Every structure is written in structure tokens, then in C-alpha cells.
Image (tube, rainbow, N blue to C red):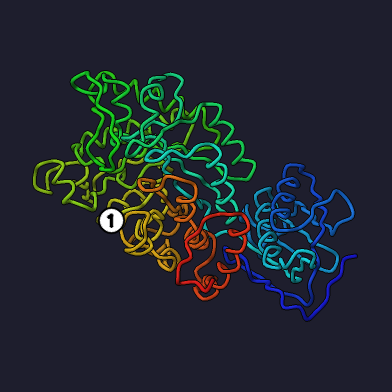
Amino acid sequence: MTTVSSGAGIVADAVIPAPVELEPAEGVLDLTTVTVRAADDAVAGLAGELLLAAGALVVPDGGVPVTLTPDPAAGPSGSSNPERYTLTVTADGVTVAAPERSGLLHGVRTLRQLVAAGRREAGEPLEVGAVVVRDEPRYAWRGLSLDVVRHWFGPADLRAVVDLVGSYKMNRLHLHLTDDQGWRLEIPSRPALTERSSQGAVSGAPGGFLTAQDYRELQEYAAEREIVVVPEIDVPGHVNAATHAYGELMPSGEPTETYDGIEVGFSKLHIDLPATEPFLRDVFTDVARMTLGPWVHFGGDEVLVMQAEEFGRFVVLCQEIIAGAGKTPVAWQEAAGSAHGDQAAVAALAGTPAASGTAASEATDAAEEPALVRPGTVLQYWDTRPDPAPFVRAARAGAKFVMSPADRAYLDMKYTPEHPLGQHWAAFVELHDSYDWDPAALIDGLPESAIEGVSAAVWTETLQSRDDLFSMLLPRLAAVAETAWSQPEAKDWESFRTRVAIEAATWRRENAAYHPTPQIDW
């Protein structure tokens, strides 16, 4: 029998990211045994999986009803956000209402956290406080960028990352699939890319790649969870794996040697070689054809040994190919024509003074200079050091921005100087650093309407296992997720500290590695 009683000290505000409205009511509901009802069998199945993992027993009939129902009136009053939802826990059971499938899953994820927070010893009731949650995200793009090149993470690891991303209502998984060390995606028209260049990784670690079928299955797994996979093929720099496979991409006609180090900026394509444009057209057309989502990322970062004019031609060409294949181009911030922030590195590679005229050092900053990017192209902002003028100009031209500031959202940065994993070229990034920032305040003069969203990023030079990876993601990914979802006025560091400590019980039960930062009272 379903009952609501008063007096139990149930934590109703254990939700990450912080919702727009959470109204606790009197009493608690025993959700030890539940029955999920939904018109969409796939959504019902996912809801059952989430609640089972949180400790509830899911049965076909006779449990406390958890009803998932389409409702255009759900969410905060007056909201038109397609991802909005309302979660209601009463004496009669649980209802999740939303206008779209994504909102239903968000509501179930919130319920999962409430159930997990109410979990007690085996055999005791699983009590959840009566509550109404009305919620919607601040930004449409809430993601994680994951490097699978420096160290290889295969399909099982990637599915685990999809589940983790979804648990905090994030909805993009951007995969960095190519770099100097290896090529991680089968390209049917260019088989040598994986035949010759898929097995490399940092320091001789084992490599690997996603077959076209692997890639399809991963995307379908993610899409079922309302997560879009965004593939990145990084050009015109970070290309040693490509030039190792196809020597005609080099002026000498000879393939480059394999590379297993961690330096950046030394490799490049050559736009005037006869082989270059056909290579780009083959690769991006195949990737677009294989990709279910609307975006294809063409990289464009850290091209430290290329003249600005040639780099600009690459930016224009890659956008033309991707758009022509029916996808929206995405690129790192350099595609806006911005300078690279570390001019000493530029000078060292170029063998010239820092103001050398390379793409990395020569920002096109004249106000009348035409933007390189097309309207709708998404730029991923990571380096906070360059002048903001090219970004403002790109926004005026119609570009959108995803905010990934390295000193806040790069989760491969060491937590502290003593931390055994990660790097620290951007900063030491503790949990509070990943939490305490506002995407709208990063670029002076950039209108908030140009911000598409937020993405954490993790580069894997020092990360060799799933435990390594998850220990760098957790707990910081939850902090970035709250920055992406919650309005600034809803964020509160002390509240987050409490909520993340509650959420950590789930990580322990699921054997997910995390870093027990001293900033939290675990």
C-alpha cells in the first residue's frame, strides 16, 4: 500500500544539477517496489533501469506507480523550453510530465537521485520525500568532450561515459577521434587511416578504433538516452596519424613516422597539395554520412606552424564540405581567427619571434575583417587568453559558442600539485573551480544569445583506464553539469557540497572511481 507519512528526515534537495523549482511537501513515499507506466516502452525500460540501480525493485504490476506522461503544460510556468519537465511525488505515487521524451528522462533522473538519497540498509523502506520539481535547462548544449586518441577507450568504456553524462542531464558527447598519435574511426573511403594509424597511443600504449558498426551502435545507445554524439576529425593540425597513413598529404610524398609523445602543434596539412582537398572531402563526407546527429567537428586548434591565410582557407573549406554534407560545422575557437594564447610555444615551433604571422599568432582583429565562420557554425571556446574581438565578430556573423574554459572545465587538469594524474598547463582545477563560473561572463562583449552551451573536456595523455578517467571526471563533471543546466541564482556552493556528498554514495555502490577532494565532507 502506498502511504505518505510525516516526520521522517528525508533529503528532498539531493538533485544535481539544481532545479528551477523544488517544493517539498509533507510526508514520505515508500518506493521500495515500483511499476513504471509509459506509452514509450524504451523510455519505460530506461526508467526501470535507473530506478533499479538506485535500489528500487521494479515489477510489471502491483508496485507504487511511476507514470511518465506527455504534457505540454509541464515545467516552470510559461516555459517553452523543449526539455522542461515536472516531477510530482504524492501519496498516490510518482508522475513525471514533459512535452518531449528528453524531459521525461530528465524527470526520471531527478527521481533516481531522490530515490538514491533515501536509500537505507537492506530490508528497510526506500523512502522519498513528497515533492514537486519544475525544471528546465539554461543552455541547450550540455556536454563532455572526450579524447580517445592519446589513450584508447573502447565501446564499453564509451557506453559507461554516456550513462554518466546522462545522469547529470548532459546531452552531448563530443569524441576527439583523430590526432598525432592515432586514428580512431573507420573511414570507408580511406581504409589506410585505421589500417596503418589506429594502433598508436601515448608511450606505446595499445590503440584501437571504432568500426562503422561500433560507431553506429554507440550513437544509437546514446540517442536512446537523448545524448547526441559529436565526432571530431581534427584538421589542419594534429594530423600526424593521417600523414602517416597517406604520404601524399606531405610535400615530400613520404608518410610521416608514428608519434607517441604528447607535444602539440608540429603537424599540419598543406592546402595546395593535390591530395589534400580530396582527402578532406572523402573523410568528412563519410563521417557526415555515418553520423546520426546534426554536428561534425573539424577541430582547427593549435595549428602552430601554418600561415594565417592558409589556415583561413582550411576553415572555409571544411565548413563548406560539412555543410554540403548536411551537417552543422563545429570547430575550436581558433576558427574565429583568434591568436593562440601561448605565443612562446608558437615562436619555439616556428623558430621565429612570436609575432611571426602564423595562424596561431596572427589574429585577424580588424573590425572590418570578414569573419571566417558561417552563420550557425559552433565554436568551442577553451583558451581564455586571446583577445575577445574575433569571437565577438564571429558572433555578429552568426556563430554560436560552446564554453569549455580550460581553467574551469578541462577535467584532465590536476586537482592539486600533488595529484598523480593529469596536467597543469592551464591551472590546477579543484571542484570549486569547476563550479564557480558563469558561461555568460567569459568573453567580453559576447551576447548571451550567442552561447549555445557548455562542455567539460578531458584529454587522456595521462589517463589509461576507466578508473583513471572517472576519477578525473568525478566529482567535477557534476559541477560543470550544474553550470550548464542551472540558472546562476539557483547555484549555491554550500548546497552543492551537500548534494555531491549524497550523490557520491551512488558512485560507491556502482564502483565508479572518484576523487575524494577535501573540499567536500564525504
Q: Quadrant where the N terminus lies?
A: bottom right
Residue 193 percent across, percent down from the top left: 38, 24
Residue 285 percent across, percent down from the top left: 44, 25
Residue 436 percent across, percent down from the top left: 43, 68
Q: Quadrant of residue 217?
A: top right
- How many numbered marks are there? 1
For the point 47% across and 52% down, the residue is: 452
For the point 50% across and 27% down, the residue is: 211
Question: Given the current orientation, which residue lies at the most extreme bottom position?
Answer: 7
Residue 7 visible in the current orientation: yes
Of the pair 518 and 158, the residue shown nearer to us:
518
Check the image and report above or below for 9 versus 37. Answer: below
Q: Quadrant of residue 146?
A: top left
Which kind of residue does numbered mark 1 sit on? Answer: Trp
Of the pair 17 and 403, the residue shown nearer to us:
17
Query: Is 133 on the left-hand or right-hand side of 161?
Result: right
Query: Where is mark 1, residue-wise?
Result: 425
